Amino acid sequence: MVLFLSTGAVVSLLGRESVVLLGFTQEVILQGLWLGFYGIIFFLLLLNWRQIIINGKNDRLLCLLVGLTFLSVIWTEVPVVTVRCSLFILATTAFGIYLAICYTRQQLLNLLVWTFGLSAVISLGLAFFLPEYGIHQDSGAWRGIYGHKNGLGCCMALAALVCLLYSFSHVKKRLVGLGFCGISIALFLLAKSVTALLVFSLILPVPLFLLLGYRLTRSFSISRVYLILLIMLVLGCAAVWLVNNLDIVLAMLGRDITMTGRTRLWQALGEMIRQRPWLGYGYGAFWLGWEGPSSYVWQSISWQPKTAHNGYLDLWLQLGAVGVAVFLCSLFTNLFKALVLLHRENNLEKVFPLLLIFFMMLLNIPESFILVRNSIFWILYVAVSIQLNNDYSSLKCSSTRPFNSMPDKINHSSD
């Protein structure tokens, strides 16, 4: 239930000011649900406090990043808001830790498949039977059980990747995984989300290429070496062509070179960042509408965004260059550890951390999901980070197998 709600599901149904249930507004209902969930999770974490301490020692960068949100109370202009937002992100992070210590990677993958599968099926039904809720009436883009088409698109892009990985690692349930994957792809295409399409297209070859590369480079066959070089050459040429013809590609996708006004927004935010470059405005203290620093941005552009539509800029605005540096160190450290673990034990489930890290890296260029409370993307990043650090620590302590050894066959786990 927590994972399902953290995708942003049912916000489109409860996200209307006129919706009142048993005398309570939608905002009170959602906050009550989250407080109840976090109360239960806090109690469960107390029962595992020793594991919490051990995991905190293994992932100091993540602890430092969350600690910076509370430390920003010192320099924020709205300390009450910062404290409240910091408590929520702490609770969200705690849920990610709970997933990491109580579920294996395979169990987490199973949970995600059924969570995303449920979201996809309900979104499909809502668009068909209640189109006034499931489809944007002005553009015709699908939004399903989410508040906006980009919400549906981003979740279904990750869902398609997770379900595809699940179908290859669970032979007995391959049809289930492929079915959910097909529905997810159809949904983010119907959502007309260019962000989801690009992120999915860029990430899909990465884990497959890494697995192929590790398998092929174990052989000294000159033909296989030529194949790897050919793939790298084709990808490099495609990247160069894309950069040189970006305006044509965006026009084909129905977008302009400003990325639907994002570049103008980023220019305005650059001016605000220059005023407080090192520590930012405090966690949760920038986007406060006309009552906060965001009012200067709204005055300089023709629309009123609620985020920077870039996770790195949002983090910079809130925690400054210090926060961005800590997160990037965490991100690239996890990337390195994921590659090492994949090289050490080449199986399909070990691809999941790489998949999620690349997904976070790319998704946070046009959208904002770093240190976002109640967000499944931040929850999964925390869970993957904790598990990676635990696995890497165990790998360093292990002396039973050579560090650079690798099994001859890919392990296909099944139920």
Image: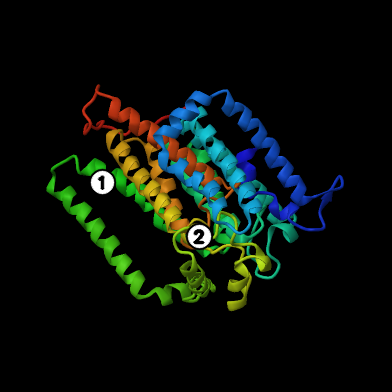
Task: Indicate the position of residue 313 as horizontal and vertical percent values.
Answer: 48, 62
Is label 1 in a helix, a strand or a loop?
A: helix
**246 versus 156 height, above or below:** below
Q: Quadrant of residue 31?
A: top right
Task: Work out whether residue 215 can be spotted.
Answer: yes
Q: How is the image coloured?
A: rainbow
Q: Which residue is mark 1?
A: 213
Task: Indicate the position of residue 204 as horizontal and vertical percent values.
Answer: 40, 52
Residue drawn at x 76%, y 47% as measured from the top left: 28
For the residue marked with disc 2, what is the amino acid? Gly
Task: Indicate the position of residue 349 as horizontal and vertical percent values.
Answer: 40, 36
Residue drawn at x 69%, y 57% as measured from the top left: 134
Is label 2 in a helix, a strand or a loop?
A: loop
Task: Work out whether residue 170 can be spotted.
Answer: no
**275 versus 216 height, above or below:** below
Label 2 environment density (alpha carbons within 10 Å; few <14, some 14–19, many ≥20)? many
Task: Indicate the position of residue 410 as horizontal and vertical percent values.
Answer: 31, 34
For the residue marked with disc 1, what is the amino acid? Gly
Label 1 environment density (alpha carbons within 10 Å; few <14, some 14–19, many ≥20)? some
Nearer to us in this view, 106 or 308? 308
Q: Earlier in the sequence, mark 2 or mark 1?
A: 1
| Number of the front mark, 2 or 1 | 2
Nearer to us in this view, 307 or 409? 307
Residue drawn at x 36%, y 70% as measured from the top left: 242
Q: Which residue is mark 2?
A: 280
Residue drawn at x 62%, y 48% as measured from the top left: 83
